[in-house]
Amino acid sequence: MTKLSVNINKIATLRNSRGGNTPNLLQVAKDAERFGAQGITVHPRPDERHIRYRDVYDLKPILTTEFNIEGNPKEQKFVDLVLEVKPHQVTLVPDSTGQLTSDHGWDTITHKSYLKDIIASFKNAGIRTSIFVDANEKMVEGAKETGTDRIELYTEEYARLYATRKEDIIQPFIKSALLAHSLGLGINAGHDLSIENLAFFKNQVPHLDEVSIGHALISDALYFGLENTIQLYLRQLK
């Protein structure tokens, strides 16, 4: 079964908007696990506009499922954080400073040498590595050369075109997943996956290990409640 990792960035955004501790990020993370989430994802950015670096340290000792930290390894503060916290998985994302949200994967050919070095440092610390890539077979082949354990398929284009072209837009993801699996890479996916488009993606894309979902899931929880929403998403992954 494909695992569901809940990204709790939006909980931190809501908390930070008032300067206090409501909603309580740590309690939400524990509740998400209790409600069935098989992992917790955070993406600290340099401006700490949602997840703060302190949050990452506070989350590590209380989580009982997989802890996944996303971020740009070109920020030395991020690298130091990951090496100190030692999550189960680090997902490397090529964000620029101040970027609103992730909007592209790594060029694994141009940045192969850099990625090899930084991935080696994480793997030497016993941390599973995943790198954000577009659904492009050349980028998947390049990812293999970096030494990463997994790739995370960037799914924004799939989500954007799902309503009108789902049969066409899913094809590059199927091909990329098949290639990645043949190369011995694990396969994650994320970005704009939702209750509407998740089941089709999971049923079409083979060998899918994990999805990381935040914005849509937290938005749905406003209507359905967090426990019910997590269960709804888990049903899409069966």
Image: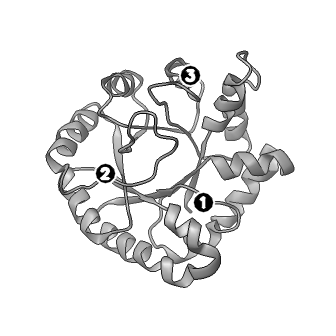
**Can residue 194 be seen by looking at this rendering?**
yes
Numbered disc 2: secondary structure: loop
Residue identified by numbered label 3? 55
Amino acid, disc 2: Asp
Nearer to us of marks 2 and 1 is 1
Residue 227, horizontal then vertical, whole percent: 79, 46
Q: Is residue 93 above or below residue 25?
A: below
Residue at 22% of width from left, 44% of height from top?
Answer: 115
Mark found first going from the N terminus, 3 or 1: 3
Residue identified by numbered label 2? 149
The quarter of the rendered structure image containing the C terminus is bottom right
Q: Is residue 170 left or right of residue 177?
A: right
**Can residue 238 be seen by looking at this rendering?**
no
Inter-mark Cα distance, 3 to 1: 25 Å
Residue 53, horizontal then vertical, whole percent: 49, 21
Q: Is residue 19 above or below residue 211?
A: above
Residue identified by numbered label 1? 193
Pick out the residue farthest to the left.
113
Q: Is residue 66 left or right of residue 199?
A: left
Identify the image quadrant of residue 80. Answer: top left
The quarter of the rendered structure image containing the N terminus is bottom right
Numbered disc 1: secondary structure: loop
Amino acid, disc 3: Asp
Amino acid, disc 1: Leu
- 44 and 40: which is toward the camera: 44
Residue 219, horizontal then vertical, whole percent: 74, 48
Mark found first going from the N terminus, 2 or 1: 2
* Mark 2 in CB contact with mark 3 (< 8 angstroms): no
Nearer to us of marks 2 and 3 is 3
Instruction: Tally the numbered discs.
Output: 3
